[in-house]
Amino acid sequence: MNLEQTKKAAKQGNAEAQILLGYRYYSGEGVKKDYEEAVGWWTLAAKKGDASAQCYLGICYSLGNGVEQSHAEAAKLFISSAKQGFADAQNLLGDCYFYGHGVVESHKEAARCYQAAAEQGNRDAQYKLGSCYEYGDGVEQNFEEAVKWYKEAADQGVIKACCALGICYYFGHGVGLDYGEAVKWFLPAAKEGIMTAQSFLGECYRLGHGVEQDDSESFKWYEKAAKQGNAESMYWVGVFYKDGKGIKQDCKESTKWMNLAADEGLAKAQLSLGISYFSGEGVEQNHEEAFKWFFLAADQGLAAAEVSLADCYRLGEGVEQNLEEAVKWYNFAAKQENAEARYRLGDCYFFGQGVKKDYRKALELYVKAGEQGHAEAQNNAGYCYYMGYGILQNYEEAFRWWTLSANQGVADAQCCLGDCYSEGTGTKLNYEEAVKWYGLAAEQGNGDAQLSLGLCYERGQGVEPNLKKLSSGTDWPQRVAMRMPSSIWDPSTKTDTASKRIPKRRSSGSWRPQSKAMREPSAVLESATRMEKAFSRITKKPSNGTDWPPNMVIRMPNLS
């Protein structure tokens, strides 16, 4: 039917012609676009009870196209159309109930409308119904149902549904975890510019989930998502520039992207930026600026940031020294079972910094951190058991903790382990093992171990006596030969400035747990952090009405 025939039929009261003519004016197909003219023709058809005309007219009222905007009038028209089973109207009525536009907000009623439209094959409703089931909006949460409806919508080309389905496969929600299947669904969504899909795809390539690990591909997809404003992707772009992974190293670019992510409120980016300012890596060193970013991240409950903030208070870096504040923030992080926080809080109790000295509490914290694998806490726990601080003296337990710590490369623990083997304390006497552990600690520059190893060579304990060994190689065997720690041995004059040997640690009782009080603030973050919390829900509904309603597309009527 050509335009003139359509106009003639419409003027004669033919409802189908009136709907078609309204569509031509609304879309500008064959005529000049004119919303008011479209509204006029659809009004005539709607008064005859035509469901499609009622739906299209409702869209005009929703958007204020050709008529004064009225959500109430739109909802009224959608209801009339939906009652006749018109799927598009059922879908849009679901939106009205979900957002409370023109009707009382009711997610339960919204889900009912989406269900009715979805069962008729409306792809937009299928996607929204899947979202309702995934998040339990208006229906009981059911991941299997969510996957079912996302799949229906994705098969009809709904790109957001492809992304949502990919997330379900990625985390195993409602379907078996399958990274390969997740990548399959992320790809079309990412290529169509869906930011969340691009970010997930970046993670898949970074971790080798469902694809071969590829830093360059990972960077490519993270960068695409970052340029659209995805904070998680901004963070990883910053990490890649910092480490030179998948892209040429560029500290300036790294700082730029970390700043963007931090400004978006991403806690781990704020922490990373704080570490950069603290160390002066990629930016001019500024402890006050570091403290600011640590505080912002810690205020969001990020345990590693709470530890770094406590470090600043403990040492007075970037803020006035306040040991009580340090203890407070260490406590916050320790309650999250952060091993570094437990270790440092243990030091506070051991030395009485910001809290009353309490060896029992210190040991309790060292043990908890040590059980999490914290090497220095294991070393300190060993010392407490050896000296009987906070508990009955127990050489076997001391030996056990020092073994754990020594195996992680802590020089003090290696030296103490050598002492245990050398004297048969907490274990069987074994000079060969003693030499082994003294040697490992000595290579790290531990003066006590160097001294003890020298004595082993001198006495032939665990090794063949070898005085030549003492005067060859590096300067430390010379110090060992003279039985002097490096702090009092002057290799240029070969003189003894102390006149006597330094007593053994355990006999003097002067040694204390070695807290590397402020190496770099503790850090950074688990690389495989799940992205569920970091990403915004892909189905998140708008908080205002400016972009509502979505998917209000008037389709060409199918008129035979």
Image (spheres, grey):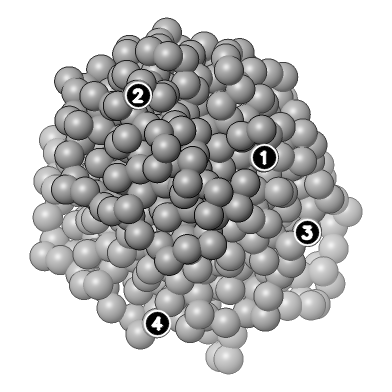
Say which element carries label 1. loop
Earlier in the chain: of badge 3 and badge 2, it is 2
Residue at the disc numbered 2: 48
Res 100 quadrant in image: top left
Badge 1 amino acid: Gly
Amino acid type, mark 2 = Lys
**Label annotation for residue 283:** 4
Spatial CA distance of label 3 from label 1 is: 28 Å
Q: Residue at x 56, y 91 (%)?
A: 493
Mark 4 to mark 2 CA distance (whole Å): 71 Å
Around disc 1, counting alpha carbons within 10 Å, would you say few (fewer than 14), some (14 to 19), or many (20 or more)? some
Asked if one can make out residue 7 in the rendered structure from this viewpoint, the answer is yes
Q: Identify the mark at residue 157; answer none if there is no mark.
A: 1
Seen in the picture, residue 311 relative to 347 is either above or below; the reply is below
Q: Quadrant of residue 103?
A: top left
**Is residue 132 shown above or below 332?**
above
Q: Amino acid at mark 3?
A: Asp
Q: Which residue is mark 3?
A: 214
